[in-house]
Amino acid sequence: MSTLGIGVIGMGWMGQVHARSYSLARQRFPDSDVAARLVICSDSVAARAESARELLGFESATTRWQDVVAQPDVDIVNIATPNNLHLEIVEAAAAAGKHIFCEKPVGRKPEETAQIERLAREAGVLSFVGFNYRWAPLALHAKQLIDAGDLGELTHYRGRFFSMYGSDPLGLLSWRFDRRIAGYGALGDIMAHVSDMALYLCGGIRRLVSNSHTFIPERPLPIPGKGTHYSRGAPEDPHGAVSNEDYVGALVEFANGARGTLEASRAIFGPKNQMAFEVNGTKGALSWDFERMNELQLYLPGEDGRHDGFMRVVGGDRYPFHGNFNPGEGSGIGYEDMKVIEAHQFLKAVAAGRQAKPGLAEALAAADAHAAMIRSWESGGWEEVNSLRIP
């Protein structure tokens, strides 16, 4: 049994999810030969750091992220901070020889993602990135069907992440709406998931044309250290300007010849958390939506055409990893279960000394597409997707 020391930086909601996921990985994968030890956590808000230590089982807590990196018992530095800290923390962690888990989008802009990828690569440390929707069992099944050729040659792909978290004009001006801290808005926060899933399922993107828009230009100011992007202010509160985009859309041409659309909006009204994709090939089609994550719509009519229509596939333990959480068919799993799968996959990779996917290389592939989108906003035309990888 290998036990790896974990240090988590940033103990907001996502940092807490990561901490729970490392702890649950051993329980949900009892046959595994790797476990996690929660060594130290940090948060700039002292009460939040101490609460995480007490509730989640860390051995110690601090307000300085540097203490996490310097802790000798930490093998993995897990970064769940606002994007403006990613580069500085990765630079320190890589220099200390620590393996790195970083939440998407990895930095504030594509060029920072490229710097971060280079730092980890040159240091020879292993990395992982929080593209957790890859780990939904039926999304994994969709990947298996595509790779097996069951859908034939892919012709169309439509990916989207529509979320209402920014649809309320009184939603607080949290760091996610501030370009100085978050960098880009919907592009980094939720288009990152859309782009990664498209690359995962359909392959590389050759070129694209894109636009962006900010629907809500100002929001109530938050009280420092309190509230999230789900929190609400009042009409009479002081307001500040939103400095990044609410919406991004793109038409894309994939390297394999397929055509597609990618969309992300944090200010749409209606869908709650619709991370979804639809794939069409020459022999079949499928679609998946996180709001119904334990269902897959599948169209595989066969040569005789007797089943010429979409069928509903219900999640169960015949699909990857589902049985680690619920036995049998029709018993669903949820968001944090995907994060447990994710944590276990990274723990296994570190214990084996191998780089697994999605790592910083995959984050950079998504950033390559995002850089082309940004150029398209400026040019108004089609842009080639080029590699930002720093030699």
Image (cartoon, grey):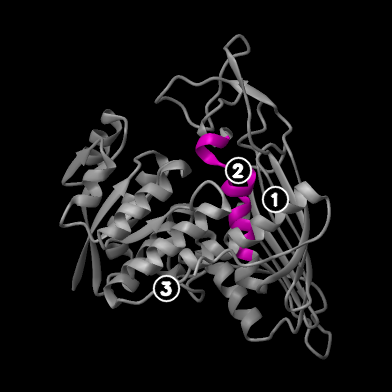
Label of residue 33 in the image: none
Of the image marks 1 and 3, the number of the one nearer the N terminus:
3
Q: In this orientation, which residue lies closer to the viewer: 165 or 367? A: 367
What residue range appears in magenta?
179-197
Label of residue 374 in the image: 1
Going 60% across and 17% down the picture, which residue do you hit?
A: 239
Of the image marks 1 and 2, the number of the one nearer the N terminus:
2
Q: Amino acid at mark 2?
A: Tyr
Which quarter of the figure has residue 170?
A: top right
Outermost residue on the top side: it is 236
- Relative image position of residue 135 (x, y in whole percent): 50, 65
Residue 62's place in the image compared with 117, above or below, is above
Going 28% across and 43% down the picture, which residue do you hit?
A: 65
Instruction: State yes or no: discs 1 and 2 in contact (Cβ < 8 Å).
Output: yes
Q: In this orientation, which residue lies closer to the viewer: 314 or 152? A: 152
Residue, disc 3: 356
Going 20% across and 71% down the picture, which residue do you hit?
A: 2
Residue, disc 2: 184
- Relative image position of residue 133 (x, y in whole percent): 54, 60
From this viewpoint, is residue 325 visible? no
Residue 375's place in the image compared with 11, above or below, is below
Q: In this orientation, which residue lies closer to the viewer: 388 or 40? A: 388
- Relative image position of residue 305 (x, y in whole percent): 84, 85
Going 79% across and 80% down the picture, which residue do you hit?
A: 307
Q: Secondary structure at mark 1?
A: helix
Outermost residue on the bottom side: it is 303
Foreground: disc 1 or disc 2: 1
Of the image marks 2 and 3, the number of the one nearer the N terminus:
2
Q: Secondary structure at mark 2?
A: loop
Instruction: State yes or no: discs 1 and 3 in contact (Cβ < 8 Å).
Output: no
Instruction: State yes or no: discs 2 and 3 in contact (Cβ < 8 Å).
Output: no
